[in-house]
Image (cartoon, rainbow, N blue to C red):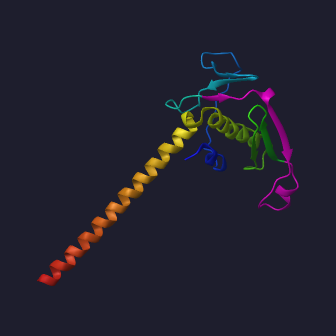
Amino acid sequence: MSTSSFFGLPARLARLCTMPRGLGPQAKPVLSAPRVAVTLVQAAGKKDRPALPLLDESELEEQFVKGHGPGGQATNKTSNCVVLKHIPSGIVVKCHQTRSVDQNRKLARQILQEKVDIFYNGENSIVYKEKQEAEKKKQERKRRAKETLEKKKLLKELRELSKNVH
């Protein structure tokens, strides 16, 4: 599965504990490129999950546009949809999951953080690995369900054969 296919999927949301760049033991620059320095932030409540890259506010371009979708006039006339662009990578995220601008801003930053992680780290990114694990578990559940169904069919056939014999 390519990394670009993840961009269309809704990202899993996690509460993030952010720290200013260069402060604390968790904020260590990980990736350096011209004008880009990505730092890591530990996700709150997820001890086993490694850190995601921290977004620098100076590298973000934020717009508020009118909402869309169900909700009628309440959503269509208010500018509570957040469009967030990460300038160095060119990744754009549009978030209109709630009616609150503040919540949409937070959600957009979380989604953008995960997409930037995929952009810079590709198959080694945290989000990519989690989605791969989830896909493997789903395939395993499907396989087990199919095996169980086959066993039930076999058992039913054996019962009918034993009834016909007697």
Task: Left or right? Give the position of 98 relative to 10.
Answer: right
Q: Going 71% across and 20% down the picture, which residue do you hit?
A: 20
User: Looking at the image, is 40 positioned above or below residue 102?
Assistant: above
Q: Which residues are magenta?
A: 52-79
Residue farthest left in this picture: 166
Residue 96: give x, y in percent of width and height: 76, 49
Along the horizontal axis of the image, is 166 left or right of 54? left
Q: Quadrant of residue 26?
A: top right
Tell me the quarter of the picture where residue 161 sits.
Answer: bottom left
Q: How many marks?
A: 0
Q: Residue at x 28, y 65 (%)?
A: 151
Q: Nearer the viewer, residue 30 or 84?
A: 30
The image quadrant of residue 102 is top right
- On screen, residue 82 versus residue 24, left or right, reads right
Measuring from the top left, give residue 106's x and y in whole percent.
Answer: 72, 38
In percent of the image, x 56 and y 40: which residue is there? 128
95 inside magenta stretch: no
